[in-house]
Image (tube, grey):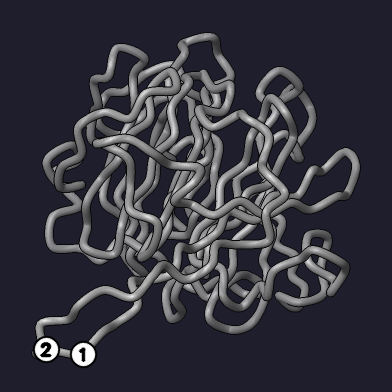
């Protein structure tokens, strides 16, 4: 069945209950056909971003090409942070931010997401490895499909989520490899339930979910103020059409050029938005984090 990201559900197709949450739903179906999901987050990565402008290339080391040949190690990517309240930007190299034996690498990040109902930061690398920071501690990494089996064989390039608003303390989590979206319910105890696999479609006036490629999502949510407020949920998404798209709980799409919108306008300290590969939002400190070279 053709799908579009969006909708407000009270009961999932696969029996997950209690979550009033947008999920991929039929373009012609009512909101009640959407799948349920849930969650609790103070962003797992809630420390202030540093102000370093980036990391210098490391010293050259001997290469396998033979005596006398050298190559510079890969330069760390950065996390570019926008303080939404002040409007200020800061930059922190990933090799300074993410440290420890189980931390993600400092390059080749494909997607990132911070949950709302739980202290969890998720990172997926370009090779499909899943990293989880739980209560500030990086857990042992592994293949994304080992945690979420329906993602096996997919090239997941973006993740987003919807926290429950009914007190169930669950999160709906979405893994996107356009036009496929895989939706799970994440429970606080670490358990997951498959909700559905959906085929995304382009909608009139909406983002190219079916024909395009999602570079990253930035979900900004306020489940405590969901009653009568369609903007309690706002999903921002960068697509390969050069636009930043916004979607709310009322199925309303808006868009602006990727380099001229409420996050990026060419101001001081901002990264080149066309180079950003992943993003996530810190609910507690109201900071938007963007990851790229």
Q: Nearer the viewer, residue 128 or 14?
A: 128
Looking at the rendered image, the quarter that the N terminus falls into is bottom left
Residue at the front extreme, as displayed: 68
SS under mark 1: loop
Q: Residues within 10 Å of mark 2 (few under 14, many from 20)?
A: few
Please state the horizontal and vertical placement of residue 86, each as a whole percent of the image: 90, 42
The numbered disc on residue 69 is 1
Q: Is residue 16 found left or right of 62 in the rendered image?
A: right
Quadrant for residue 34, please give it.
Answer: top left
Residue 108 appears in the picture as rendered = yes
Please state the horizontal and vertical placement of residue 74, each as a whole percent of the image: 36, 71
Residue 1 appears in the picture as rendered = no
Q: Nearer the viewer, residue 62 or 106?
A: 62
SS under mark 2: loop
Q: Is residue 282 found left or right of 178 in the rendered image?
A: right
Please state the horizontal and vertical placement of residue 170, each as a whole percent of the image: 43, 20
- Dots 2 and 1: beta carbons under 8 Å? yes
Q: Which residue is mark 2?
A: 67
Residue at the spot 81% in from the left edge and 67% down from the top edge: 261
Residue at the spot 63% in from the left edge and 49% down from the top edge: 289
Number of dots carrying numbers: 2
Q: Nearer the viewer, residue 257 or 12?
A: 257
Q: CA gap, disc 2 to disc 1? A: 6 Å
Q: Is residue 135 above or below residue 249?
A: above
Please state the horizontal and vertical placement of residue 88, each as a whole percent of the image: 85, 50
Residue at the spot 25% in from the left edge and 66% down from the top edge: 155
Q: Is residue 46 found left or right of 254 in the rendered image?
A: left
The numbered disc on residue 199 is none
Q: Residues within 10 Å of mark 1 (few under 14, many from 20)?
A: few
Q: Nearer the viewer, residue 52 or 170?
A: 52
């Amino acid at each position: 069945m053709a799908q579009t990201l969006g909708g407000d559900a009270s009961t999932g197709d696969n029996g997950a209950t209690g979550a009033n949450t947008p999920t991929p739903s039929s373009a012609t179906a009512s909101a009640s056909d959407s799948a349920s999901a849930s969650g609790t987050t103070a962003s797992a990565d809630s420390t202030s971003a540093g102000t370093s402008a980036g990391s210098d290339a490391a010293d050259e080391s001997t290469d396998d090409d033979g005596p006398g040949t050298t190559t510079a190690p890969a330069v760390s990517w950065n996390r570019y942070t926008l303080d939404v309240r002040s409007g200020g930007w800061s930059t922190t190299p990933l090799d300074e931010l993410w440290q420890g034996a189980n931390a993600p690498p400092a390059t080749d990040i494909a997607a990132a997401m911070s949950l709302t109902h739980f202290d969890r930061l998720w990172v997926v690398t370009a090779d499909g490895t899943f990293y989880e920071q739980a209560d500030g501690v990086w857990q042992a990494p592994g293949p994304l499909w080992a945690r979420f089996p329906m993602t096996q064989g997919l090239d997941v390039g973006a993740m987003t989520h919807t926290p429950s608003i009914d007190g169930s303390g669950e999160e709906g989590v979405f893994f996107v490899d356009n036009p496929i979206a895989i939706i799970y319910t994440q429970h606080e105890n670490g358990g997951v339930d498959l909700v559905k696999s959906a085929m995304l479609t382009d909608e009139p006036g909406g983002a190219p979910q079916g024909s395009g490629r999602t570079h990253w999502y930035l979900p900004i949510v306020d489940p405590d103020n969901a009653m009568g407020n369609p903007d309690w949920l706002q999903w921002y998404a960068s697509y390969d059409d050069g636009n930043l798209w916004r979607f709310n709980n009322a199925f309303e799409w808006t868009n602006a050029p990727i380099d001229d919108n409420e996050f990026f306008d060419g101001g001081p300290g901002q990264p080149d938005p066309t180079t950003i590969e992943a993003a996530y939002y810190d609910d507690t400190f109201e900071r938007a984090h963007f990851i790229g070279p």
